[in-house]
Image (cartoon, grey):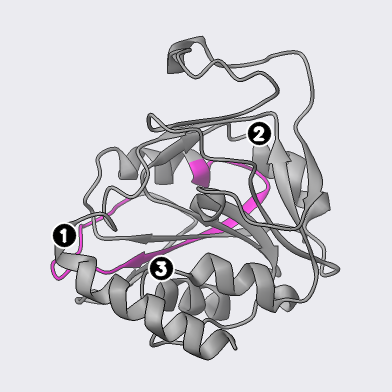
Amino acid sequence: MDKISVIIPTLWKTSGLKERLLNISNVESVGEIILIDNSETPEDIQNIDKLKHIKEYENTYVNPAWNKGARLAKYDKLCFVNDDVDFDLNIFETMLPLITEDKGMIGLAEFHGAGVWEDEPGADYSRPSDKRGDRGYKTHIFEINERKPGYGCFFFMHKKSYVQIPEDIKIWYGDDWLFYKSGKQNYSIMNFDIVGKPSQTSDLVEFNPVKNLDKLLYYRLFQ
């Protein structure tokens, strides 16, 4: 059966994640949710049917979590979701037939700031979340050749297009690696409602040394 495996790394630094997991689990086109729990004391999660709760008991960081999620996924169609975003759940049904092995990544069109993504023509960045919704035109994807900010906060990819990220690169540059290493055409999603506060976890100062090392390693390994 054609379904999507949803992969979500978390350190539980954001609120509302349990509700998000439940809502995603109720979507017909979602086959499973793989929650990579990088906290030392994992939350107890009950009554979410499609949830696979992978308890690491330490911070393995986001890029290794993506790698593990891709390896464990039961389905070939993958969706990688930040734990701090809310979005229109209809995106899964829309994207299901579009996640094919001839494509690379399919991510967000652009990060517009103020903690809100509004990937639409003439976006009104001040429009509050409760005013979002059906705008009368369809969500679609379009070809891109460079990654915009925020692209990797929510993206789809076929398992056969996923190129394992080097395990030494922990937080930054995972989306760059996937974007450029697949060798396939990448896409962005247009006309899609998503709202969140990006980098609530990765912006913590405690992770700065890891991110600085990521930068050095990425440019060394990418050559």
> Circle 1 — which element?
helix
Q: Residue at x 67, y 72 (%)?
A: 180
Is 26 left, or right, of 13 in this rendering? right
Disc on res. 205: 1
Quarter containing the C terminus:
bottom right
Q: Is residue 37 magenta?
A: yes
Q: Residues within 10 Å of mark 1 (few under 14, many from 20)?
A: few
One can see residue 169 in this view: no
Q: Nearer the viewer, mark 3 or mark 2?
A: 3
Q: At label 2, which amino acid type do we have?
A: Asn
Mark 3 → mark 2, Cα distance in angstroms: 29 Å
What residue sits right under mark 2 in the picture? 90
Q: Residues within 10 Å of mark 3 (few under 14, many from 20)?
A: some
Q: Earlier in the sequence, mark 3 or mark 1?
A: 3
Which segment is the magenta one? 24-46
Q: Is residue 175 magenta?
A: no
